[in-house]
């Protein structure tokens, strides 16, 4: 049996790590296609080095986030490999391009992290989730809420609750990160900060966010995404001294940075979850989130710029927070389902 996995950005490399191991242990051959959506070394190659992943058989090196450019290049590899399953992760344009390519060739699609919804259709990620789920024959949901969403939408595919593969990665790699990763952080309490979403990197919005963070009274460590750096440089957006802007870091360094922080401030879906699993209060720089239960549990606060300082001050991780998104063994369930439910 053979799967072809489409990856292209940082969260997908994290999710692919435990999944690739589980596929191998189940006796499933995996072909990996790396679209090149993220081409900065610290956001791409470092994952294959740090996480011990086999090199992708196909490096498309497209250096674009345009799914219309990615789709035919992915389809070419699908045509050559003829896999039993096409496996896509999350909600990026690489995800959608892989789904569209599989549909075009009539190949069965499996979607990891299916059924998540923020309710905000202005976000490209939300539209990508919906369009990918419509096309998937097998939908791997992180929780019952996601499965119920898919049932309510009437999707045709089979929805399986497996948990979240990022919980698998966090469980395995946090002890390694604490021991091995070298991160230069302040002696005083700090918040780990990331900003990369398209909506937050528009110049006026980014300036508003950086100004609010500068004035919050907190110290931040801020690995700057290449997209964010470009906008900051082009528009003269300057972080104040307590906002320590550093180069992008590898996955283990980022885990160590999170694990040592007093708060996490982010627009990343993945970091919202990692903060929860590490029991660190999170402030999310978005009006909505697909990880609704982190908010309902009281561990995650959605904040507009004018609310950041207050949210940081009030943020606490609840002592009675429930376990969310599985038990850290989602990848094994995914591999078993792919093997057991393989298409005729």
Image (cartoon, helix red, strand yellow):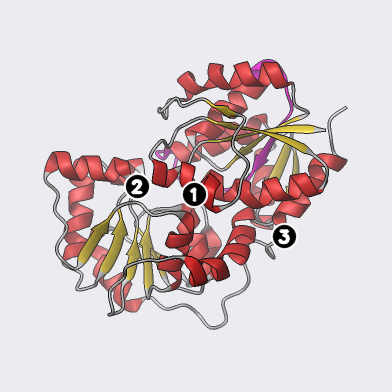
Contact, CB < 8 Å: mark 1 with mark 2? no
How far across and how far down the image is residue 171, in percent?
62, 66
Q: Residue at x 42, y 78 (%)?
A: 316
Residue 1 occupies quadrant: top right
Residue at 55% x, 39% y is 129
Query: Where is mark 2, residue-wise?
Result: 196
Q: Position of residue 309 (x, y in %)?
A: 25, 70
Q: CA distance from mark 1 to mark 3?
A: 25 Å
Q: Give the CA separation, mark 1 to mark 2.
A: 17 Å
Between 236 and 63, which is closer to the camera in this rendering?
63
Disc on the earlier residue, 2 or 3: 2
| Residue under the point 74% across and 28% down | 108
Chain-order first, disc 1 or disc 2: 1
Element assignment for label 3: loop
Residue at image position (58%, 48%) is 116
- Left or right: 300 as drawn, with respect to 102: left
Is 343 contained in the magenta span? Answer: no
As measured in the structure, the alpha-carbon distance from the residue carrying label 2 to the one carrying label 3 is: 29 Å
Q: Which mark is residue 329?
A: 3
Q: Is residue 104 magenta?
A: yes
Q: Secondary structure at mark 2?
A: loop
Which tag is nearer the camera, tag 1 or tag 2?
2
- Quadrant of the image for the C terminus? top right
Q: Is residue 45 visible?
A: yes
Q: Residues within 10 Å of mark 1 (few under 14, many from 20)?
A: some
Which residues are drawn in magenta? 103-123
């Amino acid at each position: 049996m053979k799967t072809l996995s489409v990856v292209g950005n940082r969260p997908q490399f994290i999710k692919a790590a435990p999944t690739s191991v589980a596929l191998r242990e189940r006796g499933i051959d995996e072909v990996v296609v790396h679209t090149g959506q993220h081409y900065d070394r610290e956001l791409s190659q470092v994952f294959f080095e740090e996480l011990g992943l086999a090199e992708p058989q196909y490096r498309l090196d497209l250096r674009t986030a345009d799914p219309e450019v990615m789709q035919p290049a992915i389809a070419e590899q699908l045509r050559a490999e003829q896999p039993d399953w096409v496996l896509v992760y999350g909600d990026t344009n690489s995800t959608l391009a892989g789904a569209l390519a599989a549909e075009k060739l009539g190949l069965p699609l499996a979607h990891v992290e299916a059924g998540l919804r923020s309710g905000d259709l202005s976000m490209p990620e939300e539209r990508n989730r919906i369009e990918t789920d419509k096309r998937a024959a097998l939908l791997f949901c992180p929780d019952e809420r996601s499965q119920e969403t898919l049932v309510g939408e009437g999707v045709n595919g089979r929805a399986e609750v497996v948990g979240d593969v990022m919980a698998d990665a966090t469980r395995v790699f946090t002890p390694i990160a604490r021991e091995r990763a070298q991160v230069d952080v302040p002696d005083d309490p700090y918040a780990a900060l990331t900003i990369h979403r398209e909506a937050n990197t528009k110049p006026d919005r980014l300036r508003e966010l950086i100004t609010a963070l500068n004035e919050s009274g907190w110290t931040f460590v801020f690995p700057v995404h290449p997209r964010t750096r470009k906008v900051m440089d082009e528009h003269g957006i300057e972080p104040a001294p307590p906002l320590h802007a550093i180069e992008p870091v590898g996955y283990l360094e980022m885990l160590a940075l999170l694990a040592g922080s007093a708060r996490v401030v982010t627009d990343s879906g993945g970091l919202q979850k990692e903060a929860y699993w590490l029991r660190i209060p999170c402030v999310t720089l978005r009006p909505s989130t697909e990880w609704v239960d982190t908010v309902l549990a009281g561990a995650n606060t959605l904040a507009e710029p004018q609310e950041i300082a207050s949210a940081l001050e009030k943020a606490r991780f609840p002592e009675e927070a429930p376990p969310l998104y599985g038990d850290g063994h989602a990848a094994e369930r995914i591999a078993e389902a792919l093997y057991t439910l393989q298409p005729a």
